[in-house]
Amino acid sequence: MIDIHSPSPGPGRPKDPAKREAILAAAQVLFLGNGYEGSSMDAIAAEAGVSKLTLYSHFKDKEALFCAAVKATCETRLPRRLFQLEEDCAIETLLLAIGNAFNELVNSPESIGLHRAMIALATHNPALVRMFFEAGPQQLLADLEQLFAQASSRGLLQITEPRRAAEHFCSLIKGARHFRQLIAYDDITDSTTPTEHVRDAVGVFLRAYGR
């Protein structure tokens, strides 16, 4: 399996963290705005204000940079602290917070554009699509799986298969709205607000998995 978490830096001087952050920020802007094929390493280097040599000293190739940018975007929109189960945690409040953050991320124009690009690439670049899934959606499922296992062990939820529950949660949050977004279908009859949708989805989830 491809290691997408920490591209190996080459030999030489220690890497400048500020330049790495600038490269990641530029990559997020261009990849999310122009798609994978519409973003060149030259353009990313120019956007970041670094040389191509500096860019390649931090990320070995375009694929590694793309995965790092996807992972950074997910961690910004869905920070790991959201998945921490505190001692006095109200599980419904926690699920609402995660659900609202995930709903906002997955239905954002940038995310919709990126999903469309991945669908278009699926037949002739399946390796890249797999890397995208492992850098983004797969990590979210893993975080939810761990959270649900902990919540079940503490008696906050009743879950025997945390991975399946994580998939159910994500599917409920995405709902039909996400598919309508993907195909640019504007349903003017849907007056449900994103917050109401998430509240409904969390309610269904708790009826299935609540104590």
Image (cartoon, rainbow, N blue to C red):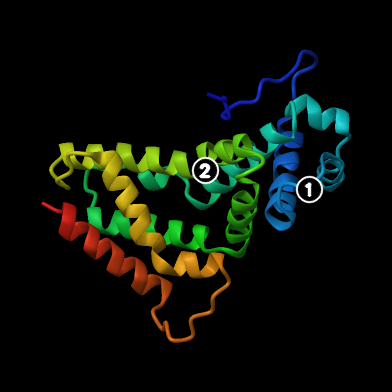
Most extreme residue toward the bottom is: 189
Give the residue at x 45% y 39%: 139
Q: Position of residue 85 (x, y in %)?
A: 29, 43
Residue, disc 2: 136
- How far apart are the two marked residues, 2 and 1, measured between alpha carbons? 19 Å
Q: Position of residue 6 (x, y in %)?
A: 60, 26
Is the Cβ of the residue at disc 2 closer than 8 Å to that at disc 1? no
Q: Is residue 108 above or below residue 11?
A: below
Q: Is residue 44 above or below residue 189?
A: above
Residue, disc 1: 39
User: For residue 191, which numbered disc appears in the image?
Assistant: none
Secondary-structure class at tag 2: loop
Q: Position of residue 190 (x, y in %)?
A: 42, 82
| Mark 2 / mark 1, whichever is N-terminal | 1
Secondary-structure class at tag 1: loop
Residue 81 appears in which quarter of the rendering?
Answer: top left
Residue 198 left/right relative to 119 = left
Q: Quick one: 2 or 45, which is closer to the camera?
A: 2
Identified by mark 2, the residue type is Gly
Most extreme residue toward the front is: 123
Identified by mark 1, the residue type is Ser
- Circle 1 crowding by C-alpha within 10 Å: few under 14, some 14–19, many from 20: some
How many marks the image carries: the answer is 2
Give the residue at x 54% y 38%: 135
